[in-house]
Amino acid sequence: MAQTETLIVGAGLAGLRALYALREKGISAVVLEASDEIGGVWNHNRYPGARCDVESFDYSYSFSKDLEQEWRWSERYPTQPEILRYINHVADRFDLRRDVVLNARVNEAVYDEDRAVWMATTSDGRTWTANTLMLCLGQLSAPKIPSYPGQEDFGGEVIVSAMWPRRKVDFSGKRVGIIGTGSSGMQMTPVIAQTAAHLTVFQRTANYSLPAANAPLTDEEDARVKANYATRRDQIRNSPTGLGFQPGKVKTLDVSDEEREAALEKSYHRLGFGFALTFPDILLDAKANAVASDFLKRKMGERVADPVLRKKLVPNDHGFGTRRPSVDGGYFEAFARDNVELSDIREHPIVAFTPEGIRTDEKLHELDIVIFATGFDALTGALLKPRIVGRDGRTLAEKWADGPLTQLGLATAGFPNMVIVAGPGSPSVLSNVIVSIEEHADWYARMLATFRAQGIVEFEATEVAEKTWTDYVQQRAQETLYGTANSFYNGGEVAGKPRVFMPFSGGVRHYRQHLQKCADENYSGFEKRKTPAAQKSTEVHRHA
Ligand code: NAP
């Protein structure tokens, strides 16, 4: 049985960053990773065109000034291979690999109440013991794979975008079908269209998208950013989404038509997701949202010449930003190609797979390759995959049966000494996630070092604190328009999943203030014990 102070589960951007933060505080840690490579989602999502839609300079760690200066991003929006190279570089540069165990999927983690330790068993047959369990399992990492009648009879190849094979997939001469038109489907469509003999995109919901405005990064731009990186990082950490954009000051309908159009036009061409903050009320007020949505619908429509196709490709059932929009590189234009076809499966649903392809209620689409770009069981999916057993034999899946409950997005009552990085209850998928990851990693490292110095062996979120915070997460979400659509933010698009808004929508800066207050109050909202509760200690220190 192997032992360490902290078991980190997952060697993606979060797990590696957490390892670095803990080491800085002299806390030992081991990272257990299911795959044979580090990188998390950037290891698994190797589909053609995979790219981050946050700018390279901002989708990077901020903990080392040297790293910031040394690394040279090649494009404004980094590709998946470049991000994976970056992650590997960081792992080598900071000697992180020596504490990473690959091919070790955590199947089960059980809390031993008497000893106040977690015991985890991994797929390689080993058992690990640690004082703290830190879950760095990603927000969008448990793929959602539909099951259609006849799927097993399909004679061609089926590939899941989030489990992309390492080998090069050759599309030339092939008839390809993509199911799903979120960021993944929209990114791969124009790339696969270039080589496939024929491409059918199966669309259930038309999605909002903005043009990526990607470009190679010049030496001048690289030097300019690196000369002022600290200021840039500061702006990011103090912006609502961790992207550096501050919301416009004037409300959408308080400016003239000309001013509004000019402001939206300017954001549209340069800002990507920053478009949503052109005016402060776009995600808060239905009328403001309708104006921004109409603007984007017009813009998307202008990219599709065929009127019938245009009507199908432009969203018609939700407002901009109420579901995750995309930033694309030529998605709409791809449909002008002779070899690209749209199958609107809301109008003509998929009936079944056949040995030859996919049959909708309209026709048979003959296919050699089907790609599921159907998204993820977001935020809770990966956390609930291993069997995590807390106090009194209760599993996390049982505890969260009606939705996730967290104290400040950090921890949940009944699961002592367990913390979650950038998961539900925190800004997570509503932020530049690397900013949220770094915030948590450093905060936890300080918390664990403090507890060690205080002789605390067991900490546990209180039920009062987690109810207060979870209610607040809901209250903040109700102030927005997020509730008006089913999305992976609220689980409404997964059959059987409770429809609960999961991330904290109050922004990264406001969230940090809550974290700071919690730490300043010696980690309020947590019970801290010098002897495990199971040993019926009299030394219980209560801080509600
Ligand atoms: P997604 O946004 O959840 O999109 C999934 C797509 O699959 C949707 O069009 C969905 O349709 C469709 N779908 C799901 N189940 C289906 C079914 N049974 N039959 C037919 N269609 C089905 O997933 P994603 O595109 O993988 O992106 C997820 C997130 O990952 C992104 O929003 C982003 O946060 C992250 N991501 C980021 C990047 C990037 O940084 N550039 C790239 C890829 C992914 P409905 O809309 O009707 O449910």
Image (spheres, rainbow, N blue to C red):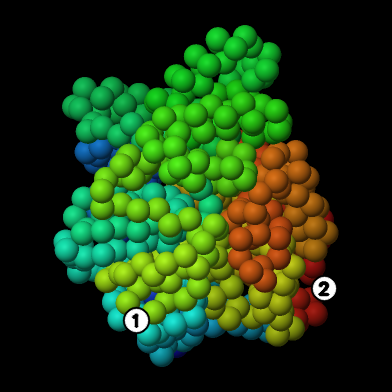
Q: Is residue 33 left or right of residue 107?
A: left
Task: Name which residue type carries label 1.
Answer: Pro
In the image, what residue occupies the spot 26% across and 25% down? 221
Q: Position of residue 44 (x, y in %)?
A: 34, 64
What residue would you read off at disc 2? 538
Up the image or down, 120 lies above or below 325; here it is below
In this view, the residue in front, 68 or 56, is: 56
Residue 326: x %, y % from top left: 45, 43
In front of the other: 177 or 435 = 177
Which residue is pictured at 19% across the width and 55% down the height?
A: 195
Find out if the beta carbon at label 1 lies less than 8 Å from the nearest ligand 1 atom. Answer: no
Residue 355 is labelled as 1
Q: For the image shown, how many numbered marks are present on the structure?
A: 2
In the image: residue 138, left or right of residue 464: left
Q: Quadrant of residue 99?
A: bottom left
For residue 184, which quarter of the picture?
Answer: bottom left
Q: Position of residue 340 (x, y in %)?
A: 30, 52
For the C terminus, which image quadrant?
Answer: bottom right
Q: Earlier in the sequence, mark 1 or mark 2?
A: 1
Which of the two discs, 1 and 2, sits closer to the camera? 1
Q: Quadrant location of residue 509?
A: top right
Residue type at the position of mark 2: Thr
Please determine whether, in this image, residue 476 is positioned above or below residue 339: above
Answer whether residue 196 is visible to the viewer in this image.
yes
